[in-house]
Image: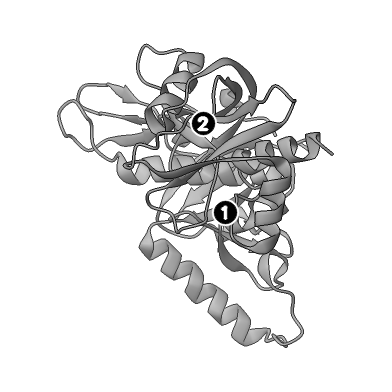
Amino acid sequence: MRRNHLSRGTDGDLSDVWARSGTVGVLSHRGYLLVAAGRLFTVSPADVPPGGTQIYLGIDPEGRDYIGIDLDDEGRTAVDQRLARDRDRDAEDFLDSPSGIHVTEPTWLGLRQIATELNDVDAGLACALVAVGNWHRTHTHSPRNGSPTEVVNGGWVRRDPGTGSEHFPRTDPAVIMAVVHTSPDGTERILLGNNAQWPEGRYSLLAGFVEPGETLEAAVIREVWEEAGVLCESPAYMGSQPWPFPSSLMLGFTAEATSLDLRPDGAELFAARWFTRQELLAEIEAGSVAVPGEVSIAGQILSSWLTAGS
């Protein structure tokens, strides 16, 4: 999927994009996406619902342009009413119909529910639409003078019509790290934490936002020390994942702990534990520990560490 910024236009009017052959729209509302038959549900130019903000999302490998429509509440109501009329007209046996992302009838589902089941094109469309749509909903006025802003550049910029100042979607960098301690006998243990807002038994990798003027590597070392009281070294980059809840870029690292000492801060981190691979797998199987799934980079990094020892 190419974002194709040269085709976004210079203002908020996407009429020329809608006029291109094959252009389709995908719909979101407050972080939910309309899906059917295992894909994002698409609308033609003739069926574009009213309300909301239109965002040019790019062009797929077949040359099809996509426009995301982040609906306001009135637009969502209009779509739901139209879908209800279609269901009444074309009723199907719901007892035999698929569920989840594979539903036959268009259904609203959260991005967290469907991210791992979408193909690469749809996953990219969904993440961009949810992230930029949230930014539009929460940044309707200029931070300089409080004036209402207008949507320009294909939905990727908001401009103060009075001063001409332009405002762009923000992405907040956050580091997330697999902190591993290796004993003299070669036994590896990974550090996992229980966030103060999570239920007991839910553990994940430590993470935190990068501060202004800070390198990513320095953020890894600082966050691990602040949250868990663990000194670590040799941060190594692993990969990244956009995390549109609402606007983060998660940057994955590994790091080496210098000791097994722990001092959870009690504020962000309620508890912290060291696990060998065998201990963690046993507790997951017993149900005493829950870890993130592979929809998140935390789950992907953790899964990679667990399988590295097999």
How far from the left and from the top, in percent, is residue 14?
50, 39
Picture quadrant where residue 304 is located: top right
Q: Nearer the viewer, residue 145 or 126?
A: 126
How far apart marks 2 and 1 lie (CA) works out to 16 Å
Q: Quadrant of residue 259?
A: top right
In percent of the image, x 59 and y 22: which residue is there? 255
Could you tell me which residue is drawn at 40 percent across and 29 percent down?
A: 170
Q: Mark 2 and 1 residues: CB-CB less than 8 Å, in contact?
A: no
Above or below 41: residue 152: above
Mark 1: give few (<14), some (14-19) or many (20+) Cα within 10 Å. few
Task: Using the rendered image of the protein, determine whether residue 182 is visible from the camera's viewpoint.
Answer: yes
Asked if 112 appears above or below 133 in the picture, the reply is below
Residue 19 in view in this figure: no
Q: Is residue 137 left or right of residue 34?
A: left
* Amino acid type, label 1: Arg
Write the residue at 56% across / 29% down: 177
| Circle 2: element type | strand
Compared across the picture, whether 253 is left or right of 36 comes to left
Disc 2 packing (10 Å; few <14; some 14–19; many ≥20): some
Q: Give the residue number, with chain letter if any, for mark 2.
A: 249
Q: Residue 186, percent across and down? A: 75, 25
Secondary structure under tag 1 reads helix
Is 302 located above or below residue 39 in the figure?
above
**Residue highlighted by disc 1:** 112
